[in-house]
Image (cartoon, helix red, strand yellow):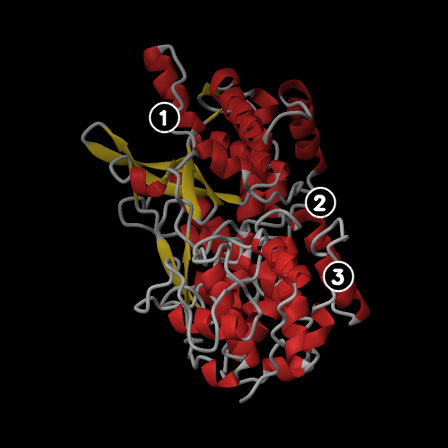
Amino acid sequence: MKHARYPQVCSLFLLLCVLLWQMTVPVSAGSDAGISFDDVPITSWYYQSVQHISEEKLMIGTSEHCFSPEKPITGAEGLVLLARVHANLTQNPDALLTQSAADKIWYQKFYDYCMDAGLLDETSSAILDTSMMQPLTRAQLLVLLSALPDTAWTVCNSIADGVIPDVSLSASYAEAVYRAYRAGITVGVDADGNFHPDGTISRAEVAAILIRIIDPSMRISVTLPANEIIVYNALGEKAAIPPSYKDDYLAHGWRMTPPTDAFSAEALLNDAVLSPTATGYQALDDQIDAVFSKILTQDMTTYEKVKACYDYLVSECTYGKSPASGNHRALYRDNPYTLSESAASALSLFTVNPSLSGDRGYDYFAAAVKEGALEAYAAMYAAELFDGMTGWCDHYSSAFAVMMRRIGLPCCPLYVDSKLGDGYKPHMTVIVTVGGVDCIFDPQIEAVLVGNTGKNQHKRFCRPISEMTAEYCHLEDLAFCRMQFGTFCCDT
């Protein structure tokens, strides 16, 4: 394919223009005979792209002998590239040779060209407003280039929605990125097809993208598997999921790349997306409101609120038989519960752990789960605790669970086996799931530890299950409990 070339002009005026351009963007001082940039070795992956793009006069060098392949481009440079490529595709090369030495803003003529050609909309203008002199991200460049004619984006790859691992379909740049993948103009930065949308883009990468736009013979064929993608939780643990699940996982704190920082309970809780839910049992909701008014303030972070609730139960409640026991049993007994077909099918698999069988508290819990009444069970025990500030592990954990749901964290109470001396004993704890991590909160055990040491060291506060396998076992019923503990159905 033969492309329009800019005519050779030898005037001093245009020489000055070239010098101005070298201070900014596009790039290559090469000629039709080849290029001679000192920093573009013939063995580099971008050699051919830089050679071609310089021959097309779409990019120039940053100096006479340097291309600076690793240097990121700015918004102004991206604007110039958009104008030049459009002029090339529409066979209008002379349109960009009218820069005046009197121009106070070196990219003004390119901006005017883009405006006259209708290449800038609200989104691209917003990008330029914030990034004119700052490095563009990879996603921002593709958004700018997406204004080029449809003929530049002929589809050559079959790329299903949702298969680019780190590009959410809900992202503002998703359409531009998927369009570029499908056209073979970019295919990601690694074997998995990740795009790294928020990373900067180098001049070498830009040269490759531009030459593929103007010369379809340079485009790349790629196939991205649509059967599963990899996501990571806050601990760096990965899970393979169908692409259609990706947005839901990301909404619950999973991420497309492994975390770079060590696990932090504070960061985990503060990053959580909250969905506050009251129980609908007015007596209990009033009790929770009264407690919150004493221990929480509006300026607290989520972490501080969770810690305040935990510390309140640890310091203010007493372990023992609740004097309010039985006062709220009608909440469990009189409410109708219905399970969806899928939930009923799953719960039919629920089994009582042999080590727990026969324990009255656990049997009651197991019955509540099988009947789809776990929320009423938790509300009943929480109300009993707040009535008398005394209770067993069921009361502590149920109260903490309903407090967390009121704050907005996804959680559920869970009966497990807890280490006691040389053995294990049936015990209820709370599992909060944030960032793809199941974390144990155990205010009742914490109260025992405080009683032994005289100091709250938060040893059972937001601890990942994977770190607590010596203290807790038999957590296999978590999936059943979590499935039905979400939106309360305790209205009476």
Mark number, residue 459? 1
Q: Position of residue 402 (x, y in %)?
A: 58, 37
Q: Residue furthest top?
A: 454
Which amino acid, by three-letter code, is at mark 3? Lys
In the picture shown, does residue 488 fall above or below 453? below
Q: Secondary structure at mark 2?
A: loop
| Residue 160 seen | no
Residue 67: image quadrant is bottom left
Q: Residue furthest right?
A: 116
Per the model, the C-alpha gap separating discs 2 and 1 is 37 Å
Dot 2 or dot 1: first in sequence order is 1
Label 1–label 3 contact, CB within 8 A: no
Which amino acid, by three-letter code, is at mark 2? Thr
In the picture shown, does residue 214 fall above or below 372? below
Label 2–label 3 contact, CB within 8 A: no
Q: Position of residue 263 (x, y in %)?
A: 39, 37
Per the model, the C-alpha gap separating discs 2 and 3 is 70 Å
Q: Secondary structure at mark 1?
A: loop
In this view, the residue in front, 213 or 352, is: 213
Dot 2 or dot 3: first in sequence order is 3
Residue 275: image quadrant is top right
Q: Secondary structure at mark 3?
A: helix
Residue 140: image quadrant is bottom right
Instruction: Answer left or right for 296 relative to 325.
Output: right
- Location of mark 2 (residue): 492
Mark number, residue 109? 3
In this view, the residue in front, 40 or 294, is: 40
Which amino acid, by three-letter code, is at mark 1? Lys
